[in-house]
Amino acid sequence: MTVDTRPGVVLRPARRDDVALILAFVRELADYERMPDAVVADEAALADGLFGPAPGAEVLIAEVDGVPAGFALFFHNYSTFLGRRGLYLEDLYVRPAFRGQGLGRRLMRHLAALALARGCGRFEWSVLDWNAPAIGFYRTLGAVGQDEWTVQRVEGKALRRLAAGAADD
């Protein structure tokens, strides 16, 4: 699935044998986002989550002359307002040595085309509010910030507490 006409650039779906690479990308992204300790995933978890019996996400790998340069991890969500599913980008990362070559734009363009081909009503993602370079990049793509929405999260002990209390309702 080569989607780039520039010689040496290949965008391809990840394979099971890419799990170690995907985990390396995730760890590099976490370092960039100033959260290196947040990564608790291991190769087994990623292999099951991405390539097991019920895959939860897909990964697109960008290579330049056969060298892994970046990735995008995405999955489908659903909008009741639109009555259609959407494409949600969880992670986008291009290694520093390959930045400024248009790989991020190519990954985003590919995902936008994939969203349209799959009948999605929207393509969305989150970005850290301090990440001005990423926000600026996304604006060049036509993205519009959804400032009236805030992300909410329940995890760890709070998730277990909520689940346990839900049985009492």
Image (tube, grey):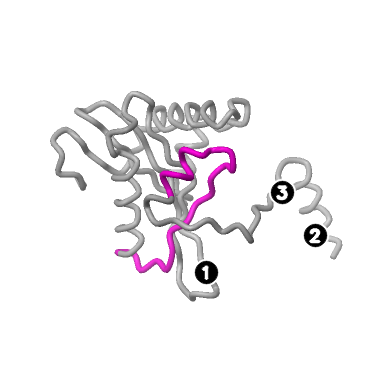
Q: Which mark is residue 154?
A: 3
Q: Which mark is residue 79?
A: 1
The crowd level at tag 2 (other Cα within 10 Å; few <14, some 14-19, many 20+) is: few
Q: Which mark is residue 166?
A: 2
- Which region of the structure is painted magenta? 117-138
Picture layout, residue 155 above or below residue 37? below
Query: Which is more N-terminal, label 2 or label 1?
Result: 1
* Inter-mark Cα distance, 2 to 3: 14 Å
The crowd level at tag 1 (other Cα within 10 Å; few <14, some 14-19, many 20+) is: few
- Quarter of the image containing the C terminus? bottom right
Q: Which of 161 and 73 lies nearest the eye of the viewer?
A: 73
Picture layout, residue 85 above or below residue 37? below
* Inter-mark Cα distance, 1 to 3: 21 Å
Location of residue 137 by image quarter: top left
* Inter-mark Cα distance, 1 to 2: 25 Å
The crowd level at tag 3 (other Cα within 10 Å; few <14, some 14-19, many 20+) is: few
Kind of residue at disc 3? Val
Query: Element under label 1?
Result: strand
Q: Is residue 116 left or right of residue 5?
A: right
Kind of residue at disc 1? Ser
In the rendered image, residue 70, in percent from the top left (x then y), is placed at: 35, 34
Location of residue 61 by image quarter: top left
Kind of residue at disc 2? Ala
In the rendered image, residue 90, in percent from the top left (x then y), is placed at: 49, 46
In the rendered image, residue 107, in percent from the top left (x then y), is placed at: 32, 45
Query: Element under label 2?
Result: helix
